[in-house]
Image (cartoon, grey):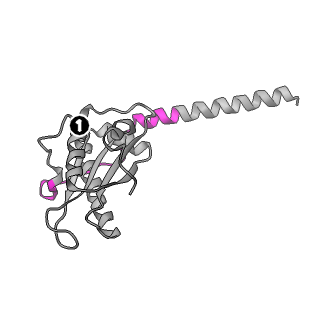
């Protein structure tokens, strides 16, 4: 077996691998979502209600290989314990997810296929959260705030975390690009 035959065999394997990945990705993008949420009317939470200030959440699209992310913006002025912060981030994530599953399921599927990136960032005040939420909604991004129940560390109704997305990274960065990592 000559070196030419070995090189030809290696090129053929590389072409086969690229073709397999391409076909697999295409089939994956055409599949139905693996995650479905069925919520009865009596199980719905306050954050499930479409907010009147929401833009058209169905307008946001992501390119085939475009990365998407969900950003969680946490108020550091409240000095929440790590467990409290984690719980509030979970509430915010779920609020955006449940909204977009209904209003833009293709975007949710794309985010799920591309790794479900979640980034935690710092905010210094409720005013800053409100400004970021307003900007996000003006760009037709899903933005949901968590208002604490007041049973542990934070006063009832305090806005603790804002979730923005999931959406294409470039679009989310227009809202959150200047914030620092938590």
Q: Position of residue 147 (x, y in %)?
A: 18, 59
| Quadrant of image for the C terminus | bottom left
Q: Is residue 6 left or right of residue 84?
A: right
Quick one: SS at disc 1?
helix
150 or 128, which lies in front?
Answer: 128
Q: Is residue 114 above or below residue 18?
A: below
Does residue 80 belong to the magenta stretch?
no
Label 1: how many residues lie within 10 Å, few (<14), some (14-19) or many (20+)? many
Q: Position of residue 173 (x, y in %)?
A: 36, 40
Residue segment shown in magenta? 23-46
> Which residue is disc 1 drawn over?
57
Does residue 27 belong to the magenta stretch?
yes
Q: Is residue 13 above or below residue 153?
A: above
| Quadrant of image for the N terminus | top right
109 or 88, which lies in front?
Answer: 88
Q: Position of residue 6 (x, y in %)?
A: 81, 31
Q: Position of residue 132 (x, y in %)?
A: 25, 45
Whether residue 80 is visible here, answered yes or no, is: yes
View extreme (right): residue: 2
Residue name at image x 33 percent, y 38 percent:
174
110 or 159, which lies in front?
Answer: 159
């Amino acid at each position: 077996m000559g070196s030419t035959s070995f090189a030809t065999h290696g090129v053929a394997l590389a072409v086969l691998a690229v073709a397999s990945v391409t076909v697999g990705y295409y089939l994956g993008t055409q599949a139905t979502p693996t995650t479905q949420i069925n919520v009865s009317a009596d199980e719905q939470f306050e954050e499930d209600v479409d907010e009147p200030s929401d833009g058209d959440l169905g307008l946001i699209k992501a390119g085939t290989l475009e990365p998407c992310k969900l950003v969680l913006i946490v108020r550091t002025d409240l000095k929440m314990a790590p467990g409290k912060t984690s719980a509030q981030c979970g509430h915010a994530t779920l609020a955006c997810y449940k909204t977009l599953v209904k209003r833009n399921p293709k975007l949710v599927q794309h985010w799920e296929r591309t790794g479900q990136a979640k980034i935690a960032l710092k905010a210094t005040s409720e005013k800053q959260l409100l400004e970021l939420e307003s900007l996000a909604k003006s760009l037709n991004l899903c933005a949901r705030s968590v208002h604490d129940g007041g049973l542990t560390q934070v006063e009832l109704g305090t806005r603790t975390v804002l979730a923005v997305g999931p959406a294409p990274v470039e679009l989310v960065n227009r809202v959150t690009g200047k914030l620092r990592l938590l």
